[in-house]
Image (spheres, rainbow, N blue to C red):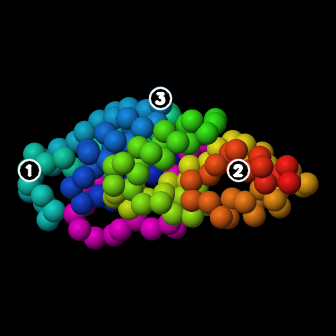
Amino acid sequence: MDKVSVWLWCDGTAEEQATFYTGLIPDSAITSVSRAPADYPAGKAGDVLTVTFTLAGRSFAMLNGGPGPTHSEAMSLQIDCVDQAEVDHIWDAILANGGTEMACGWIKDRWSLAWQIVPRRLAELMQDPVNGPRAMTAMMTMKRIDVAALERAIAS
């Protein structure tokens, strides 16, 4: 595990979430599943208590803490996508699993965790002093980022 890792609060869904996330992102795996040694307020002895996993080599952990804190857009996971095909693959998987589209490349999964699905080309264009303003204007009209539409916007 990294010296500093991200912990996410869950209401009994930690293993299900970690399984979905690690199946979605290459170079990812569940590294441990810990079970409660005794009953606790949100569960029983033997229930999954924590799950640790990596997403593209970065450490994360989930705690089945029960009802309580919920996720918000104040924390999101950004995925650096090499191309439109990768954007579409991840976006479609989250959407098909109960996700909700948001604006500007953001999508919430069915557990309300916010994701930013960002093609590298958008990041390149946003840093360009000439094309950046047109790329940003085009991006602001999108839910899923469309690289071809960005290219058309900067060409006009």
Label 3 sits on residue: 27
Quadrant into which the N terminus falls: top left
Q: In the displayed orientation, state which residue is furthest to the right.
A: 130
Label 2 sits on residue: 149
Q: Is residue 91 left or right of residue 109?
A: right
Camera-near label (3 vs 1) is: 3
- x and y percentages locating residue 86 in the rendered image: 55, 37
Residue that appears at 33% across and 69% down: 69
Cα–Cα gap, marks 2 and 1: 53 Å
Quadrant into which the C terminus falls: bottom right
Q: Which mark is residue 45?
A: 1
Camera-near label (2 vs 1) is: 2
Identified by mark 1, the residue type is: Ala
Residue 42 position by quadrant: bottom left
Foreground: 118 or 5?
118
- x and y percentages locating residue 107 in the rendered image: 48, 57
Residue stretch in magenta: 63-81
- Residue 54 visible from this viewpoint: no
Q: Is residue 17 left or right of residue 128?
A: left
Residue that appears at 77% across and 46% down: 151
75 is within the stretch colored magenta: yes
Foreground: 89 or 25?
89
Foreground: 87 or 150?
150
Camera-near label (3 vs 2) is: 2
67 is within the stretch colored magenta: yes
Identified by mark 2, the residue type is: Ala
Cα–Cα gap, marks 3 and 2: 30 Å
| Dot 2: element | helix
Cα–Cα gap, marks 3 and 1: 32 Å
Looking at the image, is 116 positioned above or below residue 92? below
